[in-house]
């Protein structure tokens, strides 16, 4: 809509400037008319090439005295050209043409009037152009302020959701995990008190299921607290400073290449730590004896990329109790909340890879 309106305005200005030449036919010849029409047509270029529009309008101004195209072009230069030198030159040349176009200069009074006419006309065009330029900048500033306000509102809403998630995590931790822990303790006590092998096996199964459920529950709590406020964490949250302790383990063959900048957002640091932690835990469970390669860096100056790759297991794999893979789900949701992605992939040779990608700012794109 704005584009069509701009086109209509340009056509109207061209028509007005051309009309100036047509109305002057009774005092001018064909050459003057052509120059006026060229100057008028040059106004079609004023938005993209305002200085060219001024140059095309000047011949008609100096030879015919028709000021309309030159004044419009000068106003456009004042609106769109940031160079003070270019504006000064365009203003000076237009002022000279307007002054010389005065009907007759036969006395000092006529010269003064011509100068006043040239000054007011060219100065008025520049003033209108600069006023329009300031209006455009002000509108852009207001639009930016509105976007900033919307972003602030979005972040406030997100913080409120995160706070509620943290509250829910605390409730789950205080209630559910306590009950599951009691189940584990009671099952262990039952195994000691009875001698029936079937009862012992059942109690052991209950104990293992309860322990696995508790582990998965804690993984879920990590997701619920991913963007929670720092004022109410359940436990001290790890950062990249704790990553070395996680990687320096005796039971795994780990090669790490970490090249991440200082000052990363805390949520990004926690996501990297938890992903490495999950990867190493999976190796212990499903790929004993495997070599592990951990790489982390920044791609294209804006994306944090972490990969944890392990080779095929070289030792017998101990059967594990089936889980719901909530660890990977939690990492995937965490990455999504931060505007990134998480993927895992097994290869035909028995190796396994997980990859985390997050924006450097740790903030989801709107």
Image (cartoon, grey):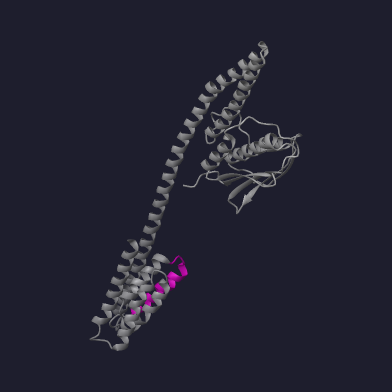
Q: Would residue 100 be visible to someone looking at this image?
A: no
Q: In the shown orientation, is residue 236 left or right of residue 136?
A: right
Q: Which residues are magenta?
A: 81-100
**Left or right: where does residue 315 sit relative to residue 119?**
right
Residue 97 within the magenta-colored segment of the rendering:
yes
Task: From the top left corner, tell me how far across and down residue 350 is, in percent.
Answer: 69, 44
* Residue plotted at (61% across, 30% down): 236
Dominant secondary structure (helix, strand or loop) of the stretch shown in magenta: helix
Name above or below for residue 261 compared with residue 110: above
Q: Is residue 353 left or right of residue 36?
A: right
Residue 297 seen by the camera: yes
**Viewer-proximal residue, 365 or 71?**
365
Residue in view at x 41 percent, y 53 percent:
141
Quadrant of the image occupied by residue 254: top right
Task: State the image quarter where residue 108 is shown.
Answer: bottom left
Residue 319: x and y, percent?
68, 31
Q: Quadrant of residue 72?
A: bottom left
**Residue 1: x, y in percent?**
32, 61
Q: Between 358 and 322, which is closer to the camera in this rendering?
A: 322
- Left/right placement of residue 256 relative to residue 139 reads right
Image spot of residue 33 (x, y percent): 30, 84
Q: Nearer the viewer, residue 212 or 85?
A: 212
How many numbered discs sit on the rendered protein?
Answer: 0
Residue displayed at 30% across by 72% down: 11
Q: Nearer the viewer, residue 281 or 9?
A: 281
């Amino acid at each position: 809509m704005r584009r069509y309106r701009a086109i209509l305005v340009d056509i109207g200005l061209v028509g007005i400037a051309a009309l100036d030449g047509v109305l002057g036919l009774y005092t001018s010849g064909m050459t003057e008319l052509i120059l006026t029409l060229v100057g008028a047509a040059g106004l079609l270029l004023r938005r993209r090439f305002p200085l060219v529009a001024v140059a095309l309008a000047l011949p008609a101004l100096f030879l015919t005295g028709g000021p309309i195209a030159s004044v419009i072009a000068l106003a456009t230069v004042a609106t769109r050209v940031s160079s003070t030198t270019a504006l000064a030159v365009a203003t000076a040349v237009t002022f000279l043409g307007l002054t010389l176009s005065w009907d007759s200069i036969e006395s000092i009074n006529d010269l003064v009037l011509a100068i006043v006419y040239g000054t007011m006309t060219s100065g008025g065009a520049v003033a209108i152009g600069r006023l329009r330029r300031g209006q455009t900048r002000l509108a852009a500033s207001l639009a930016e302020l509105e976007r900033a306000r919307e972003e602030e509102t979005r972040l406030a809403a997100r913080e409120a959701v995160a706070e509620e998630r943290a509250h829910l995590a605390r409730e789950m931790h205080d209630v559910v995990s306590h009950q599951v822990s009691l189940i584990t303790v009671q099952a262990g006590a039952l195994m000691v008190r009875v001698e029936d092998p079937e009862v012992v096996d059942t109690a052991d199964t209950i104990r293992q299921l309860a322990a696995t459920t508790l582990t998965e529950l804690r993984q879920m709590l990590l997701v619920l607290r991913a963007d929670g406020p720092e004022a109410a964490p359940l436990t001290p949250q790890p950062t990249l400073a704790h990553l070395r302790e996680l990687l320096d383990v005796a039971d795994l063959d780990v090669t790490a290449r970490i090249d991440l900048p200082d000052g990363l957002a805390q949520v990004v640091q926690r996501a990297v730590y938890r992903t490495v932690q999950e990867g190493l835990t999976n190796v212990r469970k499903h790929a004993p004896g495997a070599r592990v390669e951990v790489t982390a860096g920044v791609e294209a100056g804006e994306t944090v990329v972490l990969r944890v790759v392990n080779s095929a297991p070289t030792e017998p794999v101990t059967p594990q109790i089936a889980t719901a893979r909530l660890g990977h789900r939690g990492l995937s949701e965490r990455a999504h909340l931060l505007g990134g992605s998480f993927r895992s992939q097994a290869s035909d040779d028995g190796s396994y890879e997980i990859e985390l990608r997050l924006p450097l700012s740790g903030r989801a794109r709107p």
